[in-house]
């Protein structure tokens, strides 16, 4: 799914605007379409990745509660936890990410990808952004 116009027809929640606020934590271009207000708990946003785009390794932190759920809606992507093989993602897949798990997610090289990011409520929730996913790590997702 490399054709952006065809992908946009399938991306029912819409691509949104360039994700410039978090661009430092992504390799490639991503887009963000908030679906609820940031004050809403949980917060929902559609995140779209261009082919090959992925976010850095990161960990969701919280004193209580927290974590993230990904609801995949269009295209093909990857989710990978530290020390585990990558998981292929497509429309209808759900990923539950507990607090404290180092991971990354993004599009496959040959496809746009969108997921709804659900930021779970909790106390003192935050993201700890870590190192970029190297090209070698990303390429090994396909192995």
Image (cartoon, rainbow, N blue to C red):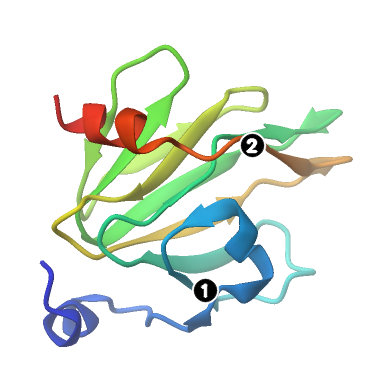
Q: How crowded is mark 1: few (under 14 residues within 10 Å), some or many (20 or more)?
A: many
**Badge 1 or badge 2: first in the primary sequence:** 1
Name the secondary structure under disc 2: loop
Residue at the spot x=36%, y=57% of the render?
53
Q: Is residue 63 left or right of residue 54?
A: right
Quarter of the figure with the C terminus: top left
Q: Which residue lies furthest to the top in this view?
A: 83
| Quadrant housing the N terminus | bottom left
Query: What residue is drawn where x is 57% and y is 42%?
Result: 68
Q: In this view, does 115 lie above or below 85?
A: below
x, y percent for residue 85? 29, 19
What's the CA distance linking mark 1 and mark 2?
A: 19 Å
The location of residue 76, given as percent across then percent down, is 19, 53
Nearer to the camera, 110 or 71:
110
Q: Where is residue 98 in the image (x, y as percent from the top left)?
A: 59, 27
* Residue positioned 12% across, 82% down in the render: 6
Vertical placement of residue 29 versus 58, above or below: below
Left/right placement of residue 127 relative to residue 63 reads: left
Residue at (66% x, 46% y) in the render:
120
In the rendered image, residue 87, in percent from the top left (x then y), is placed at 26, 30
What is the quadrant of residue 48 in the picture?
Answer: bottom left
Foreground label between 1 and 2: 1
> Which mark is drawn over residue 12?
none
Give the vertical position of 116 relative to 34 (above or below): above
Q: Do the residues labelled 1 and 2 touch (CB within 8 Å)?
A: no
Q: Is mark 1 on a helix, strand or loop?
A: strand
Residue corresponding to mark 1: 32
- Residue for badge 2: 67
Quick one: label 2, few (<14), some, or many (20+) residues within 10 Å? many
Residue 126 lies left or right of residue 95; in this view the side is right
């Amino acid at each position: 799914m490399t054709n952006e116009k065809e992908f946009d027809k399938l991306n029912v929640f819409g691509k949104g605007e360039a994700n410039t606020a978090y661009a430092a934590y992504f390799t490639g271009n991503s887009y963000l379409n908030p679906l609820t207000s940031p004050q809403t708990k949980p917060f929902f946003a559609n995140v779209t990745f261009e082919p090959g785009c992925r976010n850095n390794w990161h960990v969701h932190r919280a004193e209580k509660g927290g974590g993230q759920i990904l609801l995949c809606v269009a295209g093909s992507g990857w989710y990978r936890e530290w020390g585990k093989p990558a998981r292929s993602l497509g429309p209808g897949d759900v990923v539950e990410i507990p607090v404290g798990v180092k991971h990354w997610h993004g599009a496959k090289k040959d496809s746009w990808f969108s997921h709804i990011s659900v930021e779970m409520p909790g106390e003192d929730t935050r993201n700890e952004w870590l190192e970029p996913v190297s090209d070698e790590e990303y390429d090994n997702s396909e192995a």
